[in-house]
Image (cartoon, rainbow, N blue to C red):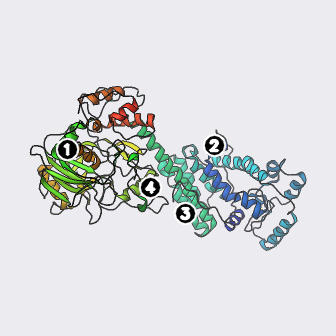
Amino acid sequence: MDVGSHPAAPSAEDLFEMLGYREAETSDAGTVEATVLDIPWSDAISERARSFIVGWETGGRAFYERVIKARPVWPEFASGITIGCGYDLGYHRPDEFRADWQGRLPGAAIERLSRTIGFRTDEPGRPAKVAQARALVRSLADIVIPWEVAIGQFDEGKMPKLVSQLYRSLDHLDRLHPHGRGALLSLVFNRGSGGFVSSKDRFREMRAIARAMATGERSEMARIPDLLRAMSRVWGEGSSLARRRREEADLFEAGLSEERLTEAVVALRQHGEAEAPAAPLAEQHEDVAEASDDEETVEEPALTEAPGPTVADVRWNPNDDDHPDYRHLPRAGQGATFDLTAADLERLVRLNVFRVRPGPLVFALRGCRIAGADLREDVEVLTLVDQRPDHRDYRCVMGVLDRGAGRMHAYRASTVPEARALVTGVQKARQGIFEGNLLPTGCYTYTVGTHRAGTSGEIRGVLRLASTATGAAEVVALRSLQDVVYDRRDFWHRCAPADNIHPGRRREGFSSLGCLTLPGDYDRGSRSHSGLWADFRVALGMGRTFAASDDGRQFSVMLLTGADAALVAGLRGAPAEGLRRLRFGSTGAAVARLQAQMGLAPDRQRLVGPVTRAAFVALQQRRLGWADGILSPEMEADLGLDVFREGEE
């Protein structure tokens, strides 16, 4: 289920079954808490957990006033006369009853109700007891306990007592999320705390819960939801009791999921933010030991049936102003056809002051297509059309620029994750797991190596986002954790996402959690590549069959948008200082000034890497409430920086 959702309220039939079912297994827990209770009971559980318990124990105010009619009832089964919010007189002592209700009810009502203390319709002689219970309910029908009195006793009398009972019974409750403590409190309300130590078979799951809690280990506590669900064997899957156990398990899991997510966010914040560091942060240009994300498999990401966004909800943000790739650009409608030359690509390198490696330059244009074709090879001019991706089809262009000859090769491609990856990304985020990302525009170093090495999805001869054949480069990627549309308020994650360049491997669509892909495939047996992917490799100087000698070859990959390219093409022969940008991969004096003004340690390479980009994103978020990770002249003014200089293109 969706861990952020609330289950449907129990029906009247469920509630009467629940009120009629109590297990008063005696506990030998002492007066000293197994877990010290040093906080008010109301701080021990979440409001969601309290509402869950109140719902199952009372049905809420409407049920109490319209169905129970605020009067004593007999819920059948083995219960006694029940008053208020599930207060079963058959399971209390006279002194308890008076302590709990003195001052809340008139003395005459207390006197009359006290005569039913300890009476419940169990064996032996149940038929006679049932008749007596029905007669008692009719006799006591003039006693009315207002909702405010009932819920007051529940919160001030019953809740503290049961919380104390729970804390006396189980170790390490302080290590649980308030949702988890609430789930176990609900169990104690319904089954008592004695089951945690009972030798009876019907309580074996409760004994297992006690053992798990005694370890204090997160891995053991994570077994508790399954133990709660396993209790259904006692009553049958269709009973309201089984449903309550399942919902307790869901509540417990919601706590585990939130803990994992918040712990991950705290770790990311500590890792990625540059605000008020103890010492100036230094830029990081080396590969990390391993990727933070698993490299993609060829199989489709597994979708769960949890409520939430579906593949049908996935779309590219229709508002360019709200997307980090387009926010910084002058407003212009998409769909323009333009001619792109090698000189235009070289100008984009200069305007972004990208540091590019010698040899062929890989260019990737997000949201772009080749007019009338899937590929163009060895040409001086490319006719392209600006468009937007859709996470379903190849709606980008990737190509190779021979910088010496001024000629280009271009192919239909994708630079975005597939639609299913956005859905699973949201689902995994609820579990504290990060999967799926959008690699922001910039200039990245890629090295020929192996994708998914040693697995069934292994592909030799791909381009890895790394500076070594087996490494993983750290970047700042964009993740959408709450919905399935990327925008400038999404989560910027400093990580090593393994966004490699490889064949899409499907007849329709492509396989990608964030990788850049081209139509085509790879055969492990023959080590042969096919499709546009193979053509792309050939344009880079590699063959259609993998050769070990290719491993370690390096290329710069300039990732921009079709709109970036169209703007520069439209200014051919005219000044373009307004299109100067600093983003990932930019280098030079302007970068050094930006790093200094953000309080970073001097960087000999004067290069925007993961530390500089993360610091800049944090600066934008603090001052603007959003980020695109790109410094333009307009953004320079908005942030009060002094970075760009006249004559620097």
- Is 391 on the left or on the right of 200, as rendered? left
Which mark is first along the chain, 3 or 4?
Answer: 3
Which mark is first along the chain, 1 or 4?
Answer: 1
Which amino acid lies under the numbered mark 1 shown in the image of this protein? Leu
- Check disc 4: other Cα within 10 Å, few if <14, some if 14-19, many if 20+: many
For label 4, the residue is 427
2 and 3 marks in contact (CB < 8 Å) = no
For label 3, the residue is 230
- Is 626 on the left or on the right of 119, as rendered? left
For label 2, the residue is 43
Q: Report x, y in % for residue 438.
A: 34, 49
Comparing 441 with 165, the one in front is 441
Which of discs 4 and 1 lies nearer the camera? The answer is 1
For label 1, the residue is 345
4 and 1 marks in contact (CB < 8 Å) = no
Q: Report x, y in % for residue 18.
A: 68, 63
Which mark is first along the chain, 2 or 1?
Answer: 2
Residue with the most extreme bottom position: 127
Res 157 visible: yes
Which mark is first along the chain, 4 or 2?
Answer: 2
* Element assignment for label 4: helix
**What residue is at 81 percent from the left and 48 percent from the top?**
99
Q: Report x, y in % for residue 9.
A: 63, 61
**What residue is at 64 percent from the left and 49 percent from the top?**
166
- Check disc 2: other Cα within 10 Å, few if <14, some if 14-19, many if 20+: few
CA gap, disc 1 and disc 3: 63 Å
